[in-house]
Amino acid sequence: MESTTAANTPLLSKPSNKCAVKDCKDRPSLAVGTCRHCQGKFCSKHRYVEAHACPNMQSCKDEAAAKLTNRLMGEKTAPAKVN
């Protein structure tokens, strides 16, 4: 029988507990720390797309513009008819 020892047990890689910005050593925010466009984990200072120079920033801007356009078109009012 083979015994399991610490020497032959594979080590599981620990997920990084630092902000994904190169020189930042802060911890990622648990509530809003993951960017939904690039999936990076960021601290509270770098959580915004502009702050961490997200590579998918243009798609983020396009998505926001489309959402605003739909919202504005839904709130559009019809002109009143004058008799």
Image: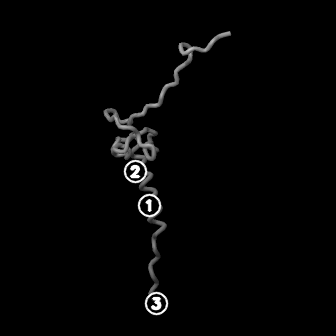
Q: In this view, which residue lies farthest toward the left?
A: 23
Can you tell which of label 1 and label 3 is closer to the viewer?
1
The N terminus lies in quadrant = top right
Number of numbered discs visible in the structure rendering: 3
Q: Amino acid at mark 1?
A: Thr
Q: CA distance from mark 2 to mark 3?
A: 44 Å
Q: Amino acid at mark 3?
A: Asn
From the top left corner, tell me how far across and down residue 6 is, in percent. Answer: 54, 16
How far apart marks 2 and 1 lie (CA) works out to 12 Å
> Disc 2 or 3, which lies upstream in sequence?
2
State which tag comes first along the sequence, 1 or 3: 1
Identify the residue at horizontal 35%, vertical 41% (top origin).
52
SS category of the residue bearing label 2: helix
Q: Nearer the viewer, residue 54 or 45?
A: 45
Q: Which mark is residue 78?
A: none
User: Callout 1: 10 Å neighbours few (<14), some, many (20+)?
Assistant: few
| Helix, strand or loop under label 1 | helix
Q: Which mark is residue 61?
A: 2
What residue does disc 1 label? 69
Residue at image location 47% in from the left, 31% down from the top: 15
Residue 3 in the image, given as x and y percentages of width and height: 63, 12
Q: Amino acid at mark 2?
A: Lys
User: Is residue 43 left or right of 12 when viewed as pictured?
Assistant: left
**Callout 1 touching callout 3 (CB < 8 Å):** no
Q: Residues within 10 Å of mark 3 (few under 14, many from 20)?
A: few
Residue depicted at x 44% and y 61%: 69
Q: Which residue is mark 3?
A: 83
